[in-house]
Image: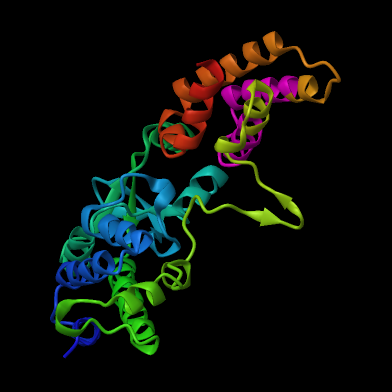
Amino acid sequence: MTLVQDLQRKALDQKIPISDLLRIAYMVAVKLNLMDFEQWLNNELNGYKNKEDLPDYRFVTGFVRSYNPYHGWQDVMVVDKWLTNTLKHLPVVDKISEVEKLAESKEEICRQLPPEMAISFARKNLGMQATIFIGKQQFHGIVDSVRTKILDWALTLERKGILGEKMNFNETERTAAQNITINNFVGSVANAPVQQGNSKVMNIEQCKNELDTAKFLVEEIKKLMDDMPQDENKETLQADIASIECQLKSPKPKMGTIREFLSSARNILEGTFGSLIASHPVIADAFSKFFG
């Protein structure tokens, strides 16, 4: 039996722990010099260090419950848009062995609300403390997705004549493997570039000067504001962004003014919405690039 056929067999065997399957797949990827597959498999084995690298299947949906000392956990109807959007898109960064344990656990799976969300929720719900609960079947889904993706990949390798006789691949097999794209198996990731119509979305690497970076920051901050609760801090942030946009539209933008309002925006984001910014490192990187 060839290395690729053995990988297929083990992908079909539910008794094989997902981590063991991933290690075999990782060996195949290394031997074939498929660096994108190596990175994906390494992330699955060791956990995702950067949420921007998470594939679509690594996001789950949660619901909120509040604990009543007399009646136990009670379901809570969420009307806050910010929290509702967050609950629909919860990242799972844990290594796959931990995900598998969660899927098989007899305990309920729950997570604490981020601090700024907990404060906002308590303020709007008479001081109630809330917790996010996540259905176990979603963690089963992550494990099954990874197992299926490895099987699909191994079948594609075989279809292209890439087998790995005696635990090794020849030069022809290694060359043929380079034409296999990881996106066909893993799917899109959180930071994949988005394109609408004929306009391309700018990324931080494309910012060649302060003005480009300011434009990039404005667009990214506006995306974040959609998920923020409406309060005094958000209103101030909206005013700062509007002032920056006025300067950016001017024939002669005043960089001093742009710096002043971006500094104010950064202080608000770091002071009030810190954990939200932590989940968007590209904004932190852009601020560092702008202010030096």
Which residue is nearer to you in this view: 96 or 59? 96
Q: In the displayed structure, would residue 243 be above or below residue 154?
A: above
Which residue is nearer to you in this view: 10 or 228? 10
Lateral position of residue 121 relative to residue 108, left or right: right
The N terminus, quarter of image: bottom left
Q: What residue range appears in magenta?
A: 217-244
Q: Is residue 72 visible?
A: no
Q: Quadrant of residue 5?
A: bottom left
Q: Quadrant of residue 236?
A: top right
Q: In the displayed structure, would residue 73 be above or below residue 19?
A: above
Q: Is residue 206 visible?
A: yes
Residue visible at 59% across and 27% down in the picture: 231
Magenta span includes 218: yes
Lateral position of residue 153 relative to residue 5, left or right: right
Question: Residue 179 location, x and y as percent?
Answer: 46, 72
Q: In the displayed structure, would residue 86 be above or below residue 258?
A: below
Q: Quadrant of residue 40?
A: bottom left
* Main secondary structure along the magenta-highlighted residues: helix
Question: Of all residues shown, which one is farthest toward the front?
Answer: 171
Question: Of all residues shown, which one is farthest toward the right?
Answer: 251
Magenta span includes 26: no
Which residue is nearer to you in this view: 120 or 30? 30
Question: Residue 26 location, x and y as percent?
Answer: 23, 66
Which residue is nearer to you in this view: 145 or 137? 145
Q: In the displayed structure, would residue 240 be above or below residue 275?
A: above
Residue visible at 71% across and 56% down in the picture: 196
Lateral position of residue 287 relative to residue 128, left or right: right
